Structure formats: C-alpha cells, structure tokens
Image (cartoon, rainbow, N blue to C red):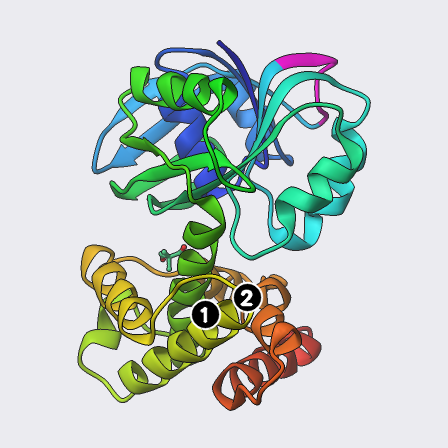
Amino acid sequence: MDIVVVGAGSLGSLIGGLLAQEHDVTLVGREPHVGSVSENGLSVVGAEEFRVQPTAQTTVPASTDLALVTVKAYDTAAVATDLADCTLDACLSLQNGMGNEERLAAELDCPVLAGTCSYGARLREPGTVAFTGRGEIVLGERNGGRSAVADDAGAAFRSAGIETTVATDMPTRLWEKLAVNAGINAVTALARVENGALADSQADAVAANAARETAAVAREQGIELSDERAVSLVERVVDDTAANHSSMYQDVSDGQQTEIGAINGYVADAATEPVPVNETLAGLVRTWERHRER
Ligand code: KPL
C-alpha cells in the first residue's frame, strides 16, 4: 500500500518507520529531520532496532492510498487544507484529543477513519527515533460500525507487524483515550515525571480525578464510560508505559506548544457541570505556555 504519514514527529516517525518495512511510505515533516531521513534513512533504536528508507519531504504528495495524520491536534486544520488538494482513498487520524476527524472530514472527499495509538516514541535527533514502548493501534469508522476501508487499513498495519484492532465503537474508544490523556499528560508535564510516577505519588489522585471528570462528560454526551473504567484505563496505561515520558511532558521539555486545548481544555469546554481538576490542569499548562519564552 502507498501510505503518507503527515506529521513526522516522534510517533509519526516510529509508526511510519514500522510501516515502511512492508509498504511504500512517505514521511511529511519538518527540516532538518526529513532532510536527514532522505539522505541517510530513518534509524529506529530502542525496543527494536532497524533502518528503513522511506521517502521524506516537507509537503504532501499529489496522491496516496492512505494518509495517516499524526500531527499535533492544533495543526489538524492546516493539514486538512493541505490534504484537500491531494487525491486520497482514505485518511486515518492517529492523534490525541477530540474533534480531529471532523476537522479532516470537513475538507476531504474520502472516508476519514479514527484511531488511537499507545506506542511510545521519542525523536532523538534528526533521522533517529527511539522506540520506547510497543503498544497497540485501534482504528475504525469514526462514527462507529464496520467498513471495508477500516478493515483494509487494519490489514495494512498488521502486515507490517503492528498489533492493530479494528473496532466498531470508535466514539467510545476516543473518549476512553481522552480520559487517559486527561489523567496522565498534564500531570506528568507539570510534575516533570515519567508516566510510571503516577502509580505511587500524590499525582495519582489528580490523574484519577481528571479521568473521572472526563468520564462524566462522556456520559453527558451519551457515551457509556464509567468512572471505574476510566480510572482503570489510566492505571493500565501508567503501568504499560511506566518508563515513558508523555507527549505533553516531551512538549514542555522541548519548550513547544502543548495539546492542552484538545485534552483537558476540551473536557472543560464540553462540560455542563463543573470539572475543577481539568480546569485547573488546563489553566496551569496554559500559564506555562504563555510564559514559556521568557
Ligand atoms: O498518549 C499518550 C501520550 O503521551 O500522549 C500516553 C498514552 C499517555 C502515553 O504516554
């Protein structure tokens, strides 16, 4: 399959690298990373080590079978505009936060699938991505149900050795993932700790409460997600990714804008009842963002 990965950051480079072992992959990203990949290939180090030679460039190509979107949530609208000029059979969002699929579907003339990913990755230097944890990809129709497009995308991931589930309940899966990100990301970024630190610290209660509030907002929207399930998912991801730094921790340590607006900020905006933990976490991270260049 011809696959274009739009967003060759940490996760996009890792998943693109894994897919490139089996498919024709183009990584779309920024310099100096894409220049280094074009010249020397992409090195994957860590949990698995290999080198692949995907095409790498800064702009989206004219056509592809599958566009895999891995950019930060705040860049989705710009990517949707870029992809609108591209001939696509299908598009899959593998991003944090809510609302990405709708933003893409508003511009694109092809099926837009939703996905979640729990792989751990960290861009080490231009051309090199660290594989910090094997996880799972779950993908499917963004409004739920089955489709041949989703089955084909799932088969393409599996043939590259990526554990993938094709799910028929993506709306629920996206809220579950949001509860996990609402619990883990801001807390680890503000406390500057690895995900595993939430297993045995005060932050554990903050993370659990942020996840409970997220579950309550999901239920307001007709999604079946209990407080207990949301908290147990946070605990499971904390365990599975104990040694990893969350993507928001990575953003903060790199001095970059975060996805707070699509995670705790989204929960706070969508809530009709008070969600003080999400509001506080969003407020603290936004305060950091406003002052990060000083
Ligand atoms: O998705 C993640 C992220 O860091 O954004 C988790 C699952 C929390 C793993 O770190």
Q: Can residue 125 be seen in this view?
A: no
Tell me: 109 left or right of 132: right
Quadrant in the picture for residue 209: bottom left
Mark 1 lies on residue:
182
Give yes or no for contact between labels 1 and 2 (Cβ–Cβ under 8 Å): yes
Ligand 1's quadrant is: bottom left
Q: Three-letter amino acid code at disc 1?
A: Ala
Residue 89 part of the magenta-drawn span: no
Q: Three-letter amino acid code at disc 2?
A: Ile
Q: Looking at the image, is mark 1 or mark 2 earlier in the sequence?
A: 1
* Whole-percent x, y for residue 154 in the image: 39, 24
Q: Give the range drawn in magenta.
A: 59-64
Residue 263 image label: 2
Residue at the location (46% across, 31% down)?
127
Closest to the observer: 197 or 129? 197
Residue at the location (51% across, 23% down)?
37
Tell me: 253 left or right of 155: right
* Whole-percent x, y for residue 205 in the image: 30, 86
Quick one: label 2, few (<14), some, or many (20+) residues within 10 Å?
many
Tell me the element at label 1.
Answer: helix
Closest to the observer: 215 or 277? 215
